[in-house]
Amino acid sequence: MAEGTTPDDDGLFKSKKVDGRYVIPWADKTRMGFGSVLKWVITETDLSGVGGTWREGWKFKEEELNRTLPVLEPNFEAIKNPPVDQLQVTWIGHATCLVQMNGLNILTDPVFNDYCGMNRLVGVKRFRPVPCTIDQLPQIDAVIISHNHYDHLDYTTVLELNRKFPESIHWYVPMGQGDWIKSCGCQNVKEMEWWDQSTHPTSKGNDVAFIFTPTQHWCKRAATDDNKALWGSWTIIGPRHRVFFGGDTGYCDVFKTIGKKYGPFDLAAIPIGAYHPRWFMQFQHVDPQQAVQIHKDLQAKTSMAVHWGTFALAYEHYLSPPKELKEAMKSEGIPQSDFIIMKHGETQIIEESISQKDVSFESSI
């Protein structure tokens, strides 16, 4: 199959299909099969503290959650009037961020629903509420989608965004996901393979490039569509700032390649949650220690923790990801301020830094 595929002359692993389905092109990386899923469900213990499994039911502890994992009312004044020459980010929850740079409002993997899944009955309920509604957002110029899992691509959210901003949004999606997005009524849809790049058409002469970069993950949204769509991360480069959005991934050396080719990054949104047990999750989800390694690989000046504290998708305690992240940063001698842990609804301005590397972009919209 695809094991043992080598990178091209530029050292880049290109996305690859076998029998109509995308595969991991580097060696010795295999996703767990159905038998392992069954073992995980039956034998492992839920440590999440919120009862995040269908076996145990939900055990909400609202007072404790409000104390330990508060949801802030967003600073809408700051969100609607972002600094012109600076980079600003708001964490909506899980993998959903509002990135504001170069006059663009960019949403990552938007999920504004109170659950993720095929429907409310079988979906995973959100244990921290969404800090704002779509109607409270400023005009959205771009949405980037990392892959089609339900906690990263929500049907109701896509419909609502298209209703609110039908013409302004440009949708940047993995190859194989375009028809689904268009079926929701969305316009301005750009499908991309790994390393494809596209310049946003409304950046008024100050080009902002969207580059689809690799990760180690997989796709599935229905019974028989495994990996018919691609997955990946996003690199966004403007005249002053560089942003990386990791989406969802296991650890692999590709982040060193991304850092070498496009870094250093002013901001990297890196997943830190849904990693226990490791024997099952390590292919598809990094743990906090590996998140710190990605931070280093990318040459990120500032990283932010995402993919935690919103949905109970694995069996670690819900406060373990930030705790272990702090421990990993300390052990590596990296200042805690270099890898920030934000509250739901919180907005931060990321320290301004002139982009240091010239990259030639091809406009393909």
Image (spheres, rainbow, N blue to C red):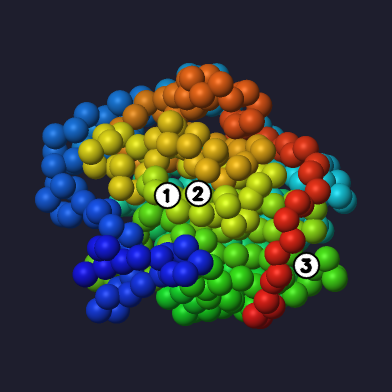
Residue type indicated by callout 3 = Asp
**Residue 33 higher or lower than 278, as above or below:** below
Could you say where residue 292 lies in the image, as x and y percent from the top left?
Answer: 50, 34
Residue type indicated by callout 1 = Asp
Quadrant of image for the C terminus:
bottom right
Q: Residue drawn at (16%, 54%), measured in percent from left and top?
A: 34
Could you say where residue 120 lies in the image, as x and y percent from the top left?
Answer: 37, 52
Q: Secondary structure at mark 3?
A: loop
Question: Which residue matches tag 3?
Answer: 207
Q: Nearer the viewer, residue 104 or 118?
A: 104
Residue type indicated by callout 2 = Lys
* Disc on res. 256: 2
Q: Nearer the viewer, residue 302 or 201?
A: 302
Q: Nearer the viewer, mark 3 or mark 2?
A: 2
* Disc on res. 253: 1
Q: Residue drawn at (13%, 42%), measured in percent from left and top?
A: 39
**Residue 195 higher or lower than 26, as above or below:** below
Q: Residue drawn at (44%, 69%), measured in percent from left and top?
A: 8
**Residue 64 higher or lower than 353, as above or below:** above
Q: Residues within 10 Å of mark 1 (few under 14, many from 20)?
A: few
Question: What distance separates the C-alpha of mark 3 from that of mark 2?
Answer: 25 Å
